Image (cartoon, rainbow, N blue to C red):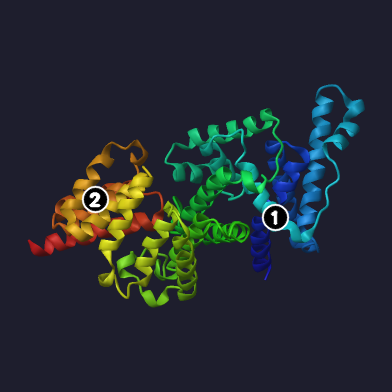
Amino acid sequence: MANQLDLSIEQLLRELAPQILSPVVRRFRDFAAAEDAVQEALIAATEQWPRDGVPANPRGWLIQVASRRMTDHIRSEVARRRREEVAAEEAERLAPPVEIAAESGDDDTLVLLFMCCHPALTRASAIALTLRAVGGLTTGEIANAFLVPEATMAQRISRAKQSIKESGIPFQLPMAEDRAQPLRAVLHVLYLIFNEGYASSAGPQLRRADLSDEAIRLTRIVYERQTDDTEVAGLLALMLLTDARRAARTGPNGELIPLAQQIRARWDRQQITEGIALLSTAMPKGAVGPYQLQAAIAAVHDEAASAEDTDWQQILALYELLKRMSDNPMIVLNHAIAAAMVHGPRKGLELLGPLDSDTRLTERHRLEAVRAHLLEMAGDHEAAILHYRIAASRATNMPERDYLIMQAARLSELRSSDQ
């Protein structure tokens, strides 16, 4: 029972964290210090709530504790500069009263999403900061999502916080007419959070349901306030149509089950129905963006009765459109797979060639995993074994690594039995 209570408190704190950071940042206007104060408040909650019980207004409790930590921080800074006599006045000036309403959490999370997409930041820095503050990802997870070294990402996040502090631009939700540009960054953030949850970049589990669930929840919040934006609808549809396969993606021991081998009866039909309805409403409204196209690809997979019934011609055409909109190497990789399914594995292998010089995929496992799969399709088992092993050596997610090792072992046994 105690373990269950601790788990429920941990989940509650994860949901509340961005809702606390938003008002504390607005109140004190120091992102880095506010983030530290919120972390201290969360630690205090993990120590006190299991013993004393969860307060009636947990969000308000956390904001008050974080605010006290910030006031202490301000007083400490003032004292360090030998201005003890004005410490209390300075803390009061920087901390105007703020109403703490238990029901305003979703709005605070939305405000934090837009605040992290600050005008003083580049798009890449805004996305990285939001992943850290709202999504709760580690620096290493964000680095994997961006295909850059962890040290590079740590510097980027640190510079982002410093840029916000030096800009003097206040944290606030943009006016409706000014939201178009930061909204694109917000959507990219949510997309990356979902991807990290659906296929974790590292660790013992294939996926992190907490992250994918949080991404869907946050995207719903954005969609409820931007119902006319077709790309918001497209992103939510993409998440639902992809997440619908969650239960079928792993076996009883957490092992990876590829799409072609999944039991489709385990797919969530309610999510699929909702995703297709969102997509069907959004696409006729105007220009079709990359999230709508990716959702359309997911819909083709979800609507196929079996792997053999998949309309690969349609998927290939959709990836052709996507390639014109983005230089993302993962789109090129998936396009090669679709081309292999339509025109044969040698065509897919040919399309993989240019990716060998793309530094964003250097030392990543996915390119070699796809190459191994296409080589196996082409009947070159010796080369496929080699590339499965190379991919396994680069995989940092354990179920993916184990799957690649098993594929190499399976082909080795097949070769031995044929000799």
Residue 4 in the image, given as x and y percentages of width and height = 65, 68
> Callout 2: helix, strand or loop?
helix
Name the residue rendered at 80%, 44% in the picture.
67
Residue labelled with disc 2: 371
Residue 261 numbered tag:
none
**Res 140 visible:** yes
Near-viewer residue (240 or 88): 240
Question: Is residue 188 toward the left or the right of residue 130 in the image?
Answer: left
What is the quadrant of the N terminus in the image? bottom right
Residue 316 in the image, given as x and y percentages of width and height = 28, 57
**In front: mark 1 or mark 2?**
1
Question: Is residue 90 toward the left or the right of residue 240 in the image?
Answer: right
Give the residue type that dot 1 points to. Answer: Asp
Give the residue type that dot 2 points to. Answer: Arg
Residue 322 in the image, given as x and y percentages of width and height = 36, 51
Name the residue rendered at 37%, 44% in the picture.
328
**Res 208 visible:** no
Q: Which residue ends up furthest to the left in the rendered image?
A: 419
Q: Residues within 10 Å of mark 1 (few under 14, many from 20)?
A: some
Near-viewer residue (267 or 80): 267
What is the quadrant of the C terminus in the image? bottom left
Question: Is residue 380 toward the left or the right of residue 85 in the image?
Answer: left
Residue 107 numbered tag:
1
- Quarter of the image holding residue 403? bottom left
